[in-house]
Amino acid sequence: MNILDSFSLKGKVALVTGGSGLYGQQMVRAMAQAGATTYTASRNLEKLVIFCDDLKKEGLEAVPLTYDQGSVESIIALRDEIIRRSGKIDILINNSVARSGNIEELTEQKANDDFAINATGIIMMCREFGRAMAEAGSGSVINIGSIYGLVGYDDWLYEGTGLVKTGGAAYYFNKGGMANLTKFFAGYYGPSGVRFNCIHPGGFETDSQPEAFKKNYTDKTFLKRMANDTDVMGVLVFLASDASAYITGTNIPVDGGLTAK
């Protein structure tokens, strides 16, 4: 096989959860542009339908579906629906996330709801989709972590910005756990030909962010900029494709060098 051909996802079936978010949209585009039969799912089906309709104007196609990551029954139903439609599932990008907010405002119920989606839900996604891939003898799962799963909390980001410090302890906990969970499943399903890797994106630049915030962030990166709407596409296609056939159990920061400092 020509090396460039090994990056193609033609003939593969991919699911991107949380596909209508800032990073989710480019993840869906990456799968579709690389040739995969692409599905995307979240709790907000209406928002996904609008996004998928917009993709058609770009000559791309993705099928919107709905599910609840806090319910294993819903996860299994999503997996089985994709297999019913396409006969298999080759690629899973675990991007859905719930945010429970500031540590000072975190209640026990908010924390339990957060963990049901971001901890238990991710474990169930990896297990249930991993099972189907293991039965088929191959597959690639890409978990979407965060730089906040690799580093500790630091006030530097908010100095002089006027923004309220987020201090999302549950988010740090879950994204940190995802880094090692990826290694667990890489070992568990590896003998069956299923690969698990995790990428850790950095901050995504938006028009609503104060300039002081952007400056604080970019000053901490080697590349002196925040992430844009294409920055995770290449690494996702690589990890989803046969080009990375011998790579599993990795955690890859996609952060302009921020966590390397």
Image (spheres, rainbow, N blue to C red):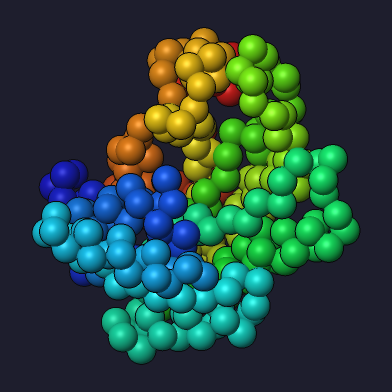
Residue 51 can be seen in this image: yes
Q: In the rendered image, is residue 255 in sight?
A: no
Q: In the rendered view, would you say 249 is above or below 133?
A: above
In this orientation, which residue lies closer to the viewer: 29 or 11? Answer: 29
Residue furthest bottom in the image: 84
> Residue at coordinates 36% horizontally, 32% vertically from top-left?
228
Residue name at image x 43 percent, y 24 percent? 226
* Residue that extends furthest to the front in the rendered view of this protein: 162
Give residue 235's quadrant in the image.
top left
Give the total number of marks visible in the rendering. 0
31 sits left or right of 194 in the view: left
Which residue sits at x=56%, y=77%?
A: 75
Residue at the outermost right position: 108
Q: Position of residue 206 (x, y in %)?
A: 42, 32
The residue nearer to you, when weighing 160 against 124, is 160
**Residue 73, above or below 150:** below
**Is 20 placed above or below 90 here?**
above
At a point 49% along the width and 27% down the height, the residue shown is 209
List x then y, in percent, for residue 257: 49, 20
Q: Position of residue 185 (x, y in %)?
A: 61, 60
**Apparent side of residue 27 relative to residue 102 in the rendered image (left or right):** left
Quadrant (top left/top right/bottom left/bottom right) for the C terminus: top right
**Residue 136 x/y as whole percent:** 41, 78
Q: Is residue 187 left or right of residue 166?
A: left
Which of the 4 image quarters holds residue 64? bottom left
